[in-house]
Image (cartoon, rainbow, N blue to C red):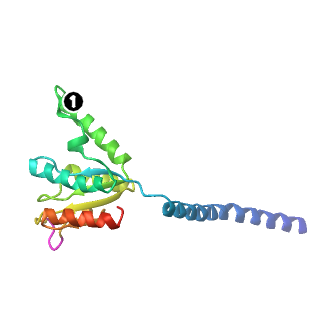
């Protein structure tokens, strides 16, 4: 009887150790991860998602990127750093789609941050896809908006877009929003 009771107690003790170890290991690794995050600098690779279909959009994108780069962020801007038109010359639509998608997807994956230009009657479809890809991968997401047009009643943006964002820099004066971004980055990291 004592032998059976001893075996049962030993079995219960072993089961308790087996089932509690992952909890302690998880708790310990979470603590180490928190310490690591506090000690290490946050990654500064930015993917800039934006419309880029007219000169005004391209010029504003470049101005935002200048502010980010001034503060030490390494920015991938598709209109500047993406596939050049010359590389697409003579390609089929299928080949162009594959080249552009693979490059941009890889850049989103390699980024720490996605910074999205939210201007337009609705935000750019491609930028929305890039935002979703980034959010699903746990990237930090930020937005900038100067456009007064809104889609949602009583909301400035679709909540599926704004819900992904840590912060949206918004001012209907483009020069002022750039100053606000510059000031914010002087005091904070993305």
Relative depth, front residue between 73 and 165: 73
Residue 162 appearing in the image: no
Question: Quick check: is 122 in the magenta stretch?
Answer: no
Q: Of all residues shown, which one is farthest toward the right?
A: 2
Above-or-below relation of 110 to 37: above
Q: Which residues are magenta?
A: 151-155
Residue 124: image x %, image y %? 17, 53
Q: Residue at x 14, y 62 (%)?
A: 174
Left or right for 51, reference 98: left
Tell which of 178 and 32 is nearer to you.
178
Residue identified by numbered label 1: 87
Quadrant in the rendering for residue 16: bottom right
Q: Residue at x 80, y 64 (%)?
A: 10
Quarter in which the N terminus is drawn: bottom right
Is residue 70 placed above or below 159 in the rendered structure? above
Question: Which residue is located at x 83 percent, y 63 percent?
Answer: 7
Report x, y in % for residue 90: 16, 25
Q: In the depicted view, which residue is nearer to us: 118 or 36?
A: 36
Determine if the magenta segment contains residue 152. Answer: yes
Where disc 1 sits, the SS reads: helix
Percent position (x, y) of residue 163? 29, 65
- Graded by Cα atoms within 10 Å as few (under 14), some (14 to 19) or many (20 or more), the crowding at tag 1 reads few
Q: Is residue 150 left or right of residue 40?
A: left
In the displayed structure, 109 sits above or below 164; it is above
Q: Residue furthest top?
A: 90
Q: Name which quarter of the figure residue 5 lies in.
A: bottom right
């Amino acid at each position: 009887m004592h032998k059976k009771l001893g075996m049962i107690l030993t079995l219960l003790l072993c089961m308790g150790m087996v089932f509690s170890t992952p909890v302690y290991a998880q708790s310990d690794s979470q603590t180490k991860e928190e310490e690591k995050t506090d000690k290490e600098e946050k990654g500064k690779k930015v993917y800039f998602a934006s419309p880029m279909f007219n000169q005004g959009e391209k010029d504003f994108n470049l101005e935002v990127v200048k502010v980010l780069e001034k503060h030490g962020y390494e920015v991938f801007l598709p209109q500047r750093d993406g596939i050049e038109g010359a590389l697409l010359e003579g390609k089929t639509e299928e080949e162009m789609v594959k080249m552009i998608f693979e490059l941009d997807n890889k850049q989103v994956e390699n980024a720490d941050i996605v910074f999205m230009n939210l201007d337009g009657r609705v935000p750019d479809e491609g930028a929305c896809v890039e935002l979703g890809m980034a959010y699903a991968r746990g990237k930090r997401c930020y937005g900038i908006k100067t456009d007064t047009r809104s889609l949602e009643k009583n909301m400035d943006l679709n909540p599926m877009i704004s819900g992904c964002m840590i912060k949206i820099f918004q001012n209907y004066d483009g020069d002022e929003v750039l100053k606000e971004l510059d000031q914010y980055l002087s005091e904070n990291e993305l």
